[in-house]
Amino acid sequence: MRISLPLFVLLIAFGCQTNPKEDTTESIITSNDQKILRNLKEIQWPKAYREQDTVLLDNILGDDFQMVDADGNWSNKNKELEWIKEHAMQHDSFYYEIKRLDILDNGTAMICGTGHILNDSTETIYQSSNVLIKRNGAWKAIASHVSGIKKLDE
């Protein structure tokens, strides 16, 4: 009986042991997402502001979008849509240079880089970071931060 009690305790101990579960979470990221995000930030987003296209900007920004501008002012989706209605772009050209693009398996992306605004012979740059989330198969911007606006010497 003495031998069977330790054996019984040992069997119970092994029976209670749990095996770590394998991560079976599937990524919602596709091989095309980097290309989609580059197009969104380099082409579509600037186009929305340049053409005062509130429909396009509404499609890019999530309903929970928030932005902090270079002066520390907060804005949201509705304020951005109103702003582009009232403010036509006055510069000759603009391009965005992506310096960092990270896409996480959980459907979150970070796009950081430099905006280049050209007007006559003057170039103004700014730094920005953007957080986007993939929802129902579409990327939506939920946060942006702009800082470091400065005119470059000619």
Image: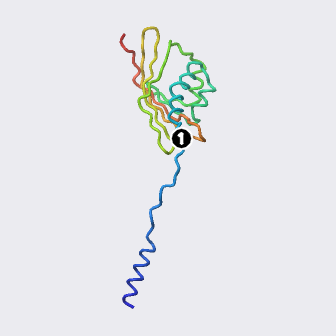
Instruction: Give the residue drawn at x 53%, y 41%.
Output: 30
Residue 14's image quarter? Answer: bottom left
Position of 55 compared to 76: left or right? Answer: right
Q: Position of residue 42 (x, y in %)?
A: 50, 25
Q: Is residue 30 above or below residue 112?
A: below
Residue 127's image quarter? Answer: top left
Question: Which of the colour schemes (rainbow, by chain, secondary structure, one colour) is used?
Answer: rainbow
Q: How many marks?
A: 1
**Residue for badge 1:** 30
Residue lying farthest to the front in this orientation: 31
Element assignment for label 1: loop
The quarter of the rendered structure image containing the N terminus is: bottom left
Q: Position of residue 80 (x, y in %)?
A: 56, 26
Residue lying farthest to the bottom in this orientation: 1
Q: Position of residue 32 (x, y in %)?
A: 53, 36
Between 4 and 127, the one lying in front of the other is 4
Residue lying farthest to the top in this orientation: 120
Instruction: Give the residue drawn at x 55%, y 40%.
Output: 134
Instruction: Give the residue drawn at x 37%, y 89%.
Output: 2
Q: Is residue 64 above or below residue 22?
A: above
Q: Is residue 22 above or below residue 9?
A: above
The quarter of the rendered structure image containing the C terminus is: top left
Between 105 and 59, the one lying in front of the other is 105
Q: Position of residue 112 (x, y in %)?
A: 43, 30
For label 1, count other residues whose C-alpha is less than 10 Å away and answer few (under 14), some (14-19) or many (20+): few
Say what amino acid the circle numbered 1 marks: Thr
